[in-house]
Amino acid sequence: MPKRLLTAVAPTRNRPALVETQLDLLSNAGYPLLIADSSDADEADAIQNLAKGRARYWMYPPDITLYDKLDRVLAAIETPYVLLLSDKKITFPHAVDLALTYLETHADFVAAHGYVLDFRRDGTDIDVTGLRFFTPSLDHDDPLQRYYHLMRRYQPGHFAVLRTEALRRAISLSTKAAGAIFQEVISMAALALQGKIARLRNVFTFQGPDISFHPIGRTDPTRWFMEDAGSFLRHYRRHRRLLMRFADELGIAAPVETRLGQLIDVINAVWLNRNFDNGMLNHTARILLGDDLPPLAGRIPPTPQGDVGPGDIVHHGANGRRYIWRRTVLEAEPREEITISAGEMIRVMDQLERCSVG
């Protein structure tokens, strides 16, 4: 596949370690690579030094939002496809090649990606601990069906190979929304309304344990609602208006005798019902009533896995490195949706052998 078709874009902020890993992997893959950095001074210097000779480096103010930064970057991209790279993930070149080939041969798809697996670095061990994102392709012909199935089992999929124009429109829409979770969701919705999204059966990325820079009260719907229900509802109404306007621009109408706004509200209620935690809501209600209860905890980093257990598979690499594939990954459910073959594991490990892992 000609590499000139795609530009790899790595938006980052204050995470040089995995940027270095991504540079090691992709700088030899033949794709033009652009780092869009909004780090503070010391980290920006480190990332700029890493990029020398391997990637273009564009600097942005530290207070710029992710979606405003992407909006500016995408305005300058000339290739028909874009690969978005997260600075919390390791994206594998073989999966990029497969995703690009898929889009080139499926004109009705706007994005393609694969499985996202959790991992952590523990000394010389690369510990693959869980499956993060895995839901099937959104391949219905009806755009509102795609929107429903996106929200029914919502999982983000921006860090993928995408058609540049479709992503440009989605990100432009997200800049008109506010609040990290609504910006994320509306950009994913905009992609799904424009075309189909493929989830290929390969490992697209590893995701590390880094915690989001956004406050939890803007990335978790339950926490936002509990902290400030009025703000949450105002932002939701804004999200709803933007989504309805975007659907109208695309010429998308609700089925006969169905109001589009009502359909969107019900579909979003399906999403929120999966996200709202009844225990947290009850706890918060009691605090607001004056009961003497401790506040809810903030984000809790995942605990390290223990020793190798039954069903875990260990591969030995160079320089004492071990790759531990946990049983929770290899036997993840639902089985009809998740297949990680021995050959796919080998492809992933072969690529990691050629780079540092931050």
Image (spheres, rainbow, N blue to C red):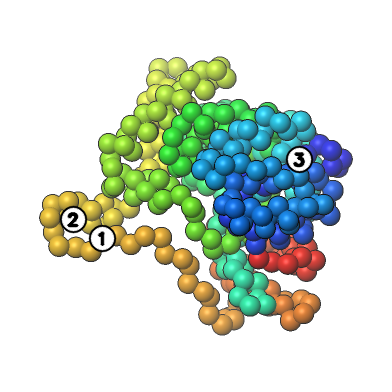
Q: Secondary structure at mark 1?
A: loop
Q: Amino acid at mark 2?
A: Ile
The residue carrying mark 1 is: 295
Quarter where residue 225 is shown: top left
Task: Point out the image quarter for the N terminus.
Answer: top right
Q: Of the two numbered discs 2 and 3 on the same chain, state the one appearing first in sequence.
A: 3
Rendered residue at 80%/44% (across/down) = 32
Instruction: State the separation of the CA atoms marked 2 and 1.
Output: 8 Å
Q: Residues within 10 Å of mark 1 (few under 14, many from 20)?
A: few
The residue carrying mark 2 is: 287
Rendered residue at 48%/20% (across/down) = 245
Residue 7 badge:
3
Quarter where residue 346 is shown: bottom right
Seen in the image, is 6 located left or right of residue 85?
A: right
- Numbered circles on residues, count: 3
Q: Secondary structure at mark 3?
A: strand
Rendered residue at 61%/37% (across/down) = 70
Residue at the limit of the structure toward the right, as seen here: 2
Q: Residues within 10 Å of mark 3 (few under 14, many from 20)?
A: many
Q: Position of residue 151 (x, y in %)?
A: 47, 40
Quarter where residue 349 is shown: bottom right
Q: Is residue 11 above or below residue 174?
A: below
Q: Amino acid at mark 3?
A: Thr
Q: Secondary structure at mark 2?
A: helix
Instruction: State the separation of the CA atoms marked 2 and 3.
Output: 50 Å
Rendered residue at 53%/40% (across/down) = 64
Q: Of the two numbered discs 1 and 3 on the same chain, state the one appearing first in sequence.
A: 3
